[in-house]
Amino acid sequence: MRSRPCETETKQEYLNIVADLEKKGAECLILGCTEIPMLLSQEDFALPVFDSTKIHSEAIVNYILSSNKRDLN
């Protein structure tokens, strides 16, 4: 799948911002908006990347599954 020019430019801008933050001492990157992971991923950075949508989704699924197990006992 080819990137559209707008996506390529936007991604490059994010990469530049993160590079600047890393130079200033950032130790990780939090993808705190639902749209950002559509452009960026861990593969784009040496810094650890945390996708807040994924983290929250996994947490709620784990909570629901653990609640169901308790209800069954």
Image (spheres, grey):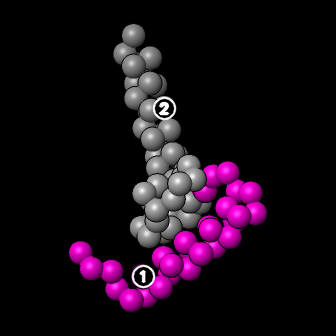
Magenta segment:
1-30
The residue drawn where x is 42% and y is 57% is 43
Residue 60: percent from the left, percent from the top? 48, 39
Mark 1, residue position = 7
In the picture, the disc for residue 21 is: none
Q: Residue furthest left?
A: 1
Residue 19 within the segment the image draws in magenta:
yes
Q: Say which element carries label 2.
A: helix
Quarter of the image with the N terminus in it = bottom left
Circle 2 residue: 63
Q: Is residue 67 above or below residue 70?
A: below
39 lies above or below 31: below
Which of the 4 quarters of the picture holds residue 7? Answer: bottom left
Could you tell me which secondary element the residue under label 1 belongs to? helix
The image quadrant that residue 24 belongs to is bottom right
Residue type at numbered disc 1: Glu
